Amino acid sequence: MAAESEDHRLLPSTRRALTHRIALAQSEGRAPSVVAAVVRGGEVVWEGSRTCVQGHGPDGNVQYRIGSITKTFTAVLVMRLRDEGLLELGDRLEKHLPGTGAGEVTVRQLLAHTGGLAAETPGEWWERTPAGLRPAIGDVLGEAPFRFEPGLRHHYSNPGYTLLGSLVEALRGKSWEEVLRAEVLEPLGLDRTTVGPQSPHAGGWAVHPWADVMMPEPVEDLGIMASAGQLWSTTTDLARFAVFLVRGDARVLSAESLREMRTPAVAPEPGATANGYGLGLQVLDHGGRALAGHGGSLPGFVAGLWLSEADDVAAVVLANCTSGVPATTVAVDLVGIVAEAEPRIPEPWRPFLGSDPVALELCGPWYWGTAAQVVRLTSDGLLELGPMGPTGRTARFRPEQDGSWTGLNGYYAGETLRAVRRADGSVSHLDLGSFVFTREPYDAGAPVPGGVDPQGWRGIG
């Protein structure tokens, strides 16, 4: 019997919990408005808003500034250049964009904020002053652009993503805005994501910290720094973008490259909360739930887009206040509400399509020293290595044409797993990055490093 298609609609109790969460955020954060959306199974399954204006509420078509979520769009453009062979992530910036004064940093370091560049620009607060004060890269970087040696540590840098935008322009021969529109926004149908505000859009407000009064924030064009935080968008567009960040789109970027973006590339900045960073995406562990996304803020606006691939849930939160609403926290909470109230229904188990006797030979229990491990062949043709007990290293491996296997995640990512055979063709042991896995603990018939005591196992007596 064919499995019934999954119904992505949310239960009334879940919908109420989502509404309560953003109502609390708007009330406690004293925000003029908050608008949010939740995606499950690739579809928007809930939308909500709260506002201080009686009888009026923003919807998924109202634009807000999204600040540094723009950086994820810029990172997608850079990854496209990599996938087309126009650059390597290990390339120094000088190779493609000479004369910046920061050419020693690599593309990868800029994407992951490990280039050692300053967090902000020299001079006045760039988000509230005209872009004409910073017409060139030199004005963004200043005379001393570095705070740390490149590659030494994670240090979030808006000038770093300005350089990435200029890199895109140099290799495409067009403005960052033109490239973004043609290569990402139009293919994905993000018609309400723009560089400048288009009606209907929210106004940005500053709310007094000690009084229930507010004033409008200035709206400045970011000029050359647009690639670090310029965009306006809607919950509808960002929900669609969140689906893309997991599933990919052949017209824009593959799911494999997006998985690379979501993979932690660097530890948290010293002294910061336990959040890491991938390539243009922030990553965090929230109560054991792995999430990827990005927060954003500009004067008058805060934003958050977060997704859990394992739960197949994403959430977007936008508000038009300078501070008060922790948009990332609220978005993460919305993901958690859905994931915990209505856990994802697993896909039906299906057997591996095809036969692979070599891989079957590798399945079952193995021992690394005395640590019991097990190798399984999964239905997608990958090998999965993990501990039999509650602790130990787990990894998945993809097959290579030469009969070896390459680690995809965890400690063994990029490492090679080989089955070493005896003269009769049977498998003697597994070699994984110099570690020897045997069918029995310290098997005397296998080349265990350091050898095995010839007296074998024994008690005390």
Image: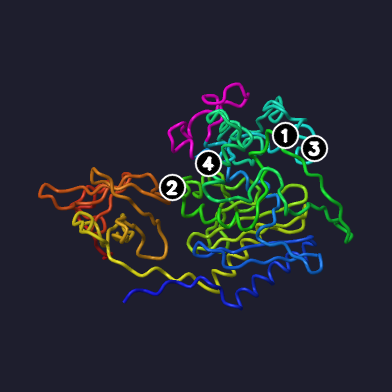
Tell me the CA gap for discs 1 and 2.
36 Å
Residue position for label 1? 121
Q: Quadrant of residue 131?
A: top right
- Residue 258 vs residue 430, the one in the foreground: 258
- Residue 250 vs residue 214, the one in the foreground: 250
Residue position for label 3? 129
**SS label for mark 2:** loop
Q: Is residue 178 rendered magenta in the image?
A: no
- Which residue is depicted at the point 43% across and 51% down? 410
Return the disc, 1 or 2, that comes first in the chain's sequence. 1
Q: Which residues are magenta?
A: 80-107
Tell me the CA gap for discs 2 and 3.
39 Å
Return the disc, 2 or 4, that comes first in the chain's sequence. 4
In the image as oriented, which residue stretches furthest toward the left? Answer: 424
**SS label for mark 3:** loop
- In the rendered image, residue 421, in percent from the top left (x then y), is placed at 17, 48
**Residue 141 tag number:** none
**SS label for mark 4:** helix
Front: mark 1 or 3:
3
Q: Amino acid at mark 2?
A: Ala
Front: mark 2 or 3:
2
- Residue 26 vs residue 116, the one in the foreground: 26
Residue position for label 4? 183
